[in-house]
Image (spheres, helix red, strand yellow):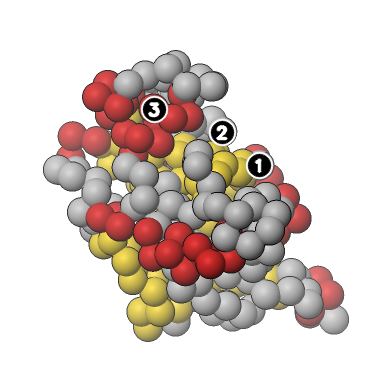
């Protein structure tokens, strides 16, 4: 992680589940069943706790006996505090963008993202750089690609975000202040894949470069 990114993105890591249209469509039938009976009305939030922070070139531990899945995502770095801002004003609060790989165990419930699945040590890689908001013409036209050992295994576009960045900032700031340094992880698209010890994992986003990690075996798997 660059010094500029580290200094600018040292706040809370907010994740948003179900924020790609394709993923939401895949889950609609499930949401129509009890006990929910409808898709979520508001953004489904989760927190990536400080212990999850990881960097470009960092190792990610594969938990023994579990499935591990990378999650390519556009990270939005908040540049100034946002409290009850409108959609029209929201983008004025963005300092810039970075790449996030939001590692997780498979989801059991999108209504209640599990701490145990999402908050393992090193499960949120960020980097390599902070790209200023002014350098990205439209953050809703960026291509995301996930590579495992050099092969593209997942590809999507921020054009398919269910809620735009401005909508997310406006809806979240209705009930809590987003502080300068916070990072909004705008969502991971459908099609998550499993990775294994020894795999080299990269996320590429248009104009933001590539974020790379290596998957390593946990202590139990090395035994």
Residue 84, visible in the rendered structure:
yes
| 202 or 156: nearer the viewer | 156
Disc 2 marks which residue? 12
Q: Is residue 213 above or below residue 174?
A: below
Direction from residue 209 to residue 65 in the image, left or right: right
Q: Residue at x 58, y 59 (%)?
A: 31
In front: label 3 or label 2: 3
Crowd band around label 1 with a 10 angstrom C-alpha radius: few (<14), some (14–19), many (20+): some
Element type at marker 1? loop
Crowd band around label 2 with a 10 angstrom C-alpha radius: few (<14), some (14–19), many (20+): some
Direction from residue 145 to residue 200 in the image, left or right: right
Label 2 vs label 1: CA separation? 8 Å
C-beta proximity under 8 Å, tags 3 and 2: no
- The image quadrant where one finds the C terminus is bottom right
Residue 138: percent from left, percent from top: 18, 45
The earlier-in-sequence mark between 2 and 1 is: 2
The earlier-in-sequence mark between 3 and 2 is: 2
Q: Residue at x 70, y 54 (%)?
A: 35
C-beta proximity under 8 Å, tags 2 and 1: no
Disc 3 marks which residue? 170
Element type at marker 2? loop
Disc 1 marks which residue? 49
Direction from residue 55 to residue 91 in the image, left or right: left
Label 3 vs label 1: CA separation? 23 Å
Residue 32: percent from left, percent from top: 57, 60
Label 3 vs label 2: CA separation? 17 Å
Q: Residue at x 25, y 55 (%)?
A: 159
Residue 81, visible in the rendered structure:
no
């Amino acid at each position: 992680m660059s010094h500029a990114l580290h200094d600018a993105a040292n706040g809370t890591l907010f994740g948003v589940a179900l924020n790609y249209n394709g993923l939401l469509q895949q889950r609609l039938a499930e949401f129509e069943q009890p006990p929910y009976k409808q898709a979520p009305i508001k953004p489904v939030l989760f927190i990536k706790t400080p212990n999850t922070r990881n960097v470009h070139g960092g190792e990610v531990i594969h938990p023994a006996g579990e499935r591990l899945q990378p999650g390519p995502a556009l990270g939005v770095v908040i540049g100034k505090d946002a409290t009850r801002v409108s959609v029209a004003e929201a983008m004025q609060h963005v300092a810039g963008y970075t790449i996030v790989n939001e590692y997780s165990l498979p989801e059991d419930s999108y209504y209640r993202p599990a701490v145990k699945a999402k908050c393992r040590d090193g499960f949120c890689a960020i980097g390599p750089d902070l790209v200023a908001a002014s350098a990205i013409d439209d953050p809703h036209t960026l291509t995301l690609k996930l590579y495992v050992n050099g092969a593209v295994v997942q590809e999507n576009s921020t054009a398919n975000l269910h809620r735009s960045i401005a909508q997310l900032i406006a809806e979240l700031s209705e009930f809590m202040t987003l502080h300068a340094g916070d990072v909004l992880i705008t969502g991971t698209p459908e099609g998550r894949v499993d990775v294994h010890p020894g795999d080299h994992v990269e996320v590429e986003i248009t104009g933001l470069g590539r974020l790379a990690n290596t998957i390593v075996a946990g202590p139990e798997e090395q035994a």
